């Protein structure tokens, strides 16, 4: 298996963070420090960092300042959202749920949803993508 790294960008010029390998360790507290130290966090209402990216799964760490909103959107696969810090309101057209630290929600593919930060918050978004294989 080929080890895959992130590409350097203007916002993250250092590059070379492993995104996919047979085994990928993730230091979540360090990643939280990183997103909170970056200009996007200091000057905007949110920041995010993809910490794992494979063909069938992505894990993204997302930080939102209080009252920030991720507008209504859909996902290409099933998702889970786990709150690590703060409090968010997770909304669909059918229901709304408030999640605090340790709270988690799962949602099926294609359901429109939005996220509002009740307090400054950090959460893990996991996106599971379908494979081409038939069981």
Image: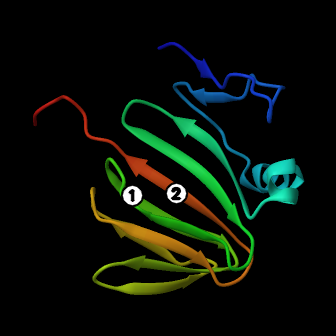
Q: Residue at x 83, y 26 (%)?
A: 13
Q: Quadrant of residue 5?
A: top right
Q: In the image, is 135 to the left or to the right of 11?
A: left
Q: Which residue is mark 1?
A: 79
Give the class, few, some or many, for how many residues have Cα within 10 Å of label 1's Cα (few <14, many ≥20): many
Q: Between residues 123 and 48, which one lies in front from this camera angle?
A: 48
Taking the spot 31% from the left edge, 49% from the top edge, the residue there is 77
Query: Dot 2 corresponds to which residue?
Result: 125
- The quadrant of the picture occupied by the C terminus is top left
Q: How is this picture coloured?
A: rainbow
Mark 2 or 1, nearer chain start: 1
| Up-down relation of residue 90 to residue 36 (above or below) | below
- Residue 58 appears at what percent x and percent y? 48, 42
View extreme (top): residue: 2
Q: Is residue 67 left or right of residue 72?
A: right
Residue 42, given in percent of the width and then of the height, sits at 88, 58
Image point (60%, 30%), residue name: 19
The part of the image, by quadrant, that contains residue 95 is: bottom left
Instruction: Identify the element where label 2 is drawn.
Output: strand
Callout 1: SS: strand
- Tell me if residue 2 comes above or below residue 52 in the rendering: above
Q: CA distance from mark 2 to mark 1?
A: 7 Å
Q: Residue at x 44, y 85 (%)?
A: 97
Classify residue 72 by image quadrant: bottom left
Give the vertical position of 13 relative to 61 (above or below): above
Q: Residues within 10 Å of mark 2 (few under 14, many from 20)?
A: many
Place of residue 44 in the rendered image (x, y in percent of width and height, measured from the top left): 78, 59
Disc sitting over residue 70 in the figure: none
**Residues at marks 2 and 1 touching, judged by CB atoms closer than 8 Å:** yes
Q: Percent position (x, y) of residue 10?
A: 80, 29
């Amino acid at each position: 298996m080929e080890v895959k790294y992130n590409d350097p960008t203007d916002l993250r010029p250092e590059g070379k963070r492993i995104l996919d390998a047979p085994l990928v360790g993730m230091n979540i507290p360090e990643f939280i420090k990183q997103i909170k130290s970056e200009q996007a966090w200091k000057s905007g209402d949110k920041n995010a960092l993809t910490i794992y990216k494979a063909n069938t799964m992505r894990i993204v760490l997302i930080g939102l300042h209080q009252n920030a909103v991720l507008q209504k959107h859909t996902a290409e696969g099933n998702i889970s959202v786990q709150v690590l810090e703060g409090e968010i309101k997770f909304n669909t057209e059918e229901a709304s749920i408030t999640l605090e630290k340790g709270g988690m929600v799962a949602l099926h593919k294609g359901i429109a949803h939005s996220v509002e930060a009740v307090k400054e918050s950090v959460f893990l978004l996991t996106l599971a993508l379908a494979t081409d294989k038939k069981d």
